Image: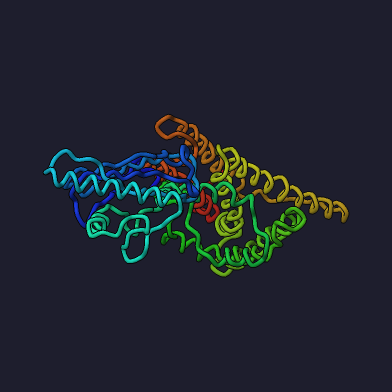
Amino acid sequence: MAESVGSYELKVKRFSGSRGRILVPYRTTDGTARAGKEYEQLNGELIFENNETEKLLSLHIIEEGCYEKDVAFQVSLGDPRILEDDSGSRLHRQQQQQMQRLQEQLQQQKAQGQPGQPNGRPPNTIPDTPENRIALLGLPTLSDVFQVTVRIRESKEFKSTVDAMMQRGTGPILGTSTWKEQFVEAFSVSPDLGGGDEEEDGGSPSCGDYIMHFFTFPFKFLFAFVPPTDYCHGWVAFWVSILWIGFMTAIIGDVSSHLGCSVGLLDSCTALSIVALGTSLPDTFASKVAALNDKYADASVGNVTGSNAVNVFLGIGIAWTLAALHHWWHGEKFLVDPGNLAFNVTIFCVGALISIFVMMVRRMRCVGGELGGPKVFKYMTTGLLLMLWFTYITLACLEAYDVIEGF
């Protein structure tokens, strides 16, 4: 039974006759479940009235606020006893009294370790008379099933939610210990845990998960070669990952440049679209992981600003510094044609201000925060930000091809 059931009615049936009043003791015993913690302990008696064949035994299950494994306890029935019944004829009452005396003798012999003989014959201390044999056949006895094991299982929905929370909270922390685990994860399609819907957490991969796995498989496969995080407390994995990111960025940049050259795109349009999109994929996944595992959105937004800072100050700064030193060493001047930089920066700043305004608006109580929230607001925000990105790319490319006039 599920832990959330609260109470459960266990049926105790009487068969092969229903005459007379019968008392059946019962009690619960601990298994892996503990009385007072997982269930309420019971120790009482059931009384079957004359012609009554079924009684209900109420079991009370205690629901806990934390997830635990399935537990079990036992419900046992004791030896039934005949109760006095004032109804019926005098002969019937005499038969009941005789059966009660025989039952008391049997209980005393059982307590002294003197079991009865097989084939239904009475013990040696009870006279072997036809009356006693008939009375013994009429005594109430337990059936073969006089003890049941009640298993308390956790709710599947609650277990799925807990598993998803554990995977979401500890997955990036635990890491991997062998290359085999990394390659298995790279080839496996895992369900997306970032939807925010409890019914979707811990379920089967969706169609979108398979599509994303198809597009991201090359990255997963390449990074599966990174040494596991158990080596040198993760430092080897950290530095090798940095090298892999730099290598992949260079490959994506060169491939994008060749692709743009093949289709006849200007270098500025290739850099803004294909190169920027390809090199931003690691930052995109890093922001997603930060959003899933951080209590607030600070880490996700901080990754975006930090990534842009690295691109501007290090990506451009180091390259231009080395180029300036090279030209200075040869007695030349390092001059860079600004091109349409002013127009691009202006459009980019306008889009950034709109994005910041959207983030401030999402702090309203009806939404709840910068990330997540109701599906309507999530889809609206996604559509608006995608529209800003397409608008920026379109205007920059139109200005580069002199379709519109820049400044």
Q: Is residue 265 left or right of residue 358?
A: right
Q: Which image quadrant for residue 244?
A: bottom right
Give the residue displayed 50% in from the left and 60% down from the top: 190
Find the residue positioned furthest to the top.
365
Confirm whether residue 224 shows in the render: yes
Q: Quadrant of the C terminus?
A: top right
Query: Relative to residue 260, is residue 11 depicted above or below?
Result: above
From the viewer's side, name the closer residue of 201 and 286: 201
Find the residue positioned furthest to the left.
89
Residue 183, horizontal then vertical, whole percent: 61, 67
Confirm whether residue 389 shows in the render: no
Give the residue displayed 66% in from the left and 62% down from the top: 248
Residue 132, horizontal then vertical, whole percent: 26, 56
From the viewer's side, name the closer residue of 363 and 128: 128
Residue 143, horizontal then vertical, whole percent: 31, 57
Q: Is residue 133 left or right of residue 310?
A: left
Q: Which image quadrant for residue 368?
A: top left
From the viewer's side, name the closer residue of 120 and 376: 120
Give the residue displayed 52% in from the left and 39% down from the top: 350
Q: Is residue 194 left or right of residue 366?
A: right
Query: How is the rendered protein coloured?
Result: rainbow
Residue 117, horizontal then vertical, whole percent: 37, 62
Q: Is residue 96 left or right of residue 300?
A: left
